[in-house]
Image (cartoon, rainbow, N blue to C red):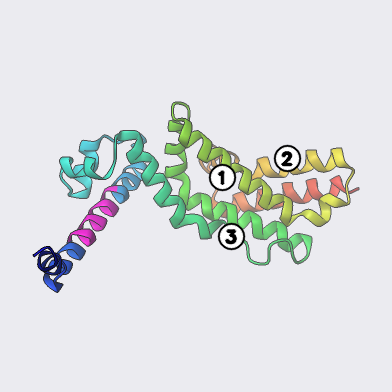
């Protein structure tokens, strides 16, 4: 009898129903997280569950099926966005080519990435003061970007005295961080092209003079 019940529970119709519910749940969860990101883009860095439900078309009750609380909702949305934009931060042939080409490549990569991630990055920073998990995520992301700079300009840094190399790496890394690009793009109102040009000049001076 037990075997018959087990066989009945795994009929194609039952499996199709389970798959359908799973797919629907995944679609709804994606809609909820995309709604959070859309609200970030509109300047709402602390969206309420009610606002997310309205934007996503998912019921308020269902929103809380996918997340534990408001902070968990934001963390999940940030994680989803980070996965989506990760390829933007990649640099082909990292560390290869002449200095001019490498400088331009990393400046273009960071500025174009900024243009895509700015709203979510602002929300992350706003939450980081009170949320240890988000703060740790930001620190880890910043460290990865610093490592990318170190690898990309390893040839130049190795030619410098250790203390000069450390100072140069810190300066180049600071110029390429999101906060600096935000200063150029938002507060100084420079275009992406202008921002890239400014960064190219600044990095060139640092990396050449550091090795002088």
Whether residue 183 is visible to the viewer of this picture, yes or no, is no
Of 189 and 173, which appears nearest the observer? Answer: 173
Disc 1 element = helix
On screen, residue 48 versus residue 83, left or right, reads left
On screen, residue 24 versus residue 30, left or right, reads left
| Residue extending furthest toward the front | 1
Q: Give the Cα separation between the discs numbered 1 and 2.
A: 17 Å
| Residue extending furthest toward the left | 1
Question: Residue 55, how many percent across, how many down?
Answer: 22, 46
- Reading the image, the residue beneath label 2 is 171
Magenta span covers which residues?
Answer: 21-32
Q: Earlier in the sequence, mark 1 or mark 2?
A: 1
- Reading the image, the residue beneath label 3 is 90
Residue name at image x 53 percent, y 42 percent: 189
Q: Which of marks 3 and 1 is nearer the N terminus?
A: 3
Query: Where, quadrant-wise, is the N terminus in this rendering?
Result: bottom left
On screen, residue 27 versus residue 143, left or right, reads left
Q: Which numbered disc, 3 or 2, marks the residue closer to the eye? A: 3
Whether residue 163 is visible to the viewer of this picture, yes or no, is yes
Residue name at image x 24 percent, y 58 percent: 27
Q: In which quarter of the image is residue 119?
A: top left
- Reading the image, the residue beneath label 1 is 141
Circle 1 residues within 10 Å: few <14, some 14–19, many ≥20: few
Residue name at image x 37 percent, y 46 percent: 77
Q: Which of marks 3 and 2 is nearer the N terminus?
A: 3
């Amino acid at each position: 009898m037990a075997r018959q019940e087990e066989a009945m529970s795994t009929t194609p119709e039952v499996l199709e129903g389970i798959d359908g519910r799973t797919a629907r749940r995944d679609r709804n969860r994606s809609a909820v997280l995309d709604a959070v990101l859309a609200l970030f883009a509109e300047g709402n860095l602390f969206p309420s569950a009610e606002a997310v439900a309205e934007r996503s078309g998912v019921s308020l009750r269902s929103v809380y099926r996918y997340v534990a609380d408001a902070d968990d909702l934001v963390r999940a949305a940030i994680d989803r966005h980070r996965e989506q934009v990760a390829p933007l931060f990649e640099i082909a042939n990292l560390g290869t080519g002449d200095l001019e080409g490498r400088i331009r490549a990393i400046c273009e990569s960071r500025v174009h990435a900024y243009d895509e991630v700015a709203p979510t990055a602002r929300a992350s920073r706003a939450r980081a003061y009170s949320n240890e998990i988000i703060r740790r995520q930001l620190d880890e992301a910043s460290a990865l970007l610093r490592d990318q700079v170190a690898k990309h300009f390893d040839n130049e840094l190795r030619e410098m005295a250790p203390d000069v190399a450390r100072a140069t790496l810190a300066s180049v890394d600071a110029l390429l961080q999101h906060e600096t690009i935000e200063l150029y793009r938002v507060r100084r109102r420079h275009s992406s092209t202008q921002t890239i040009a400014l960064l190219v000049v600044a990095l060139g001076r640092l990396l050449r003079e550091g090795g002088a």
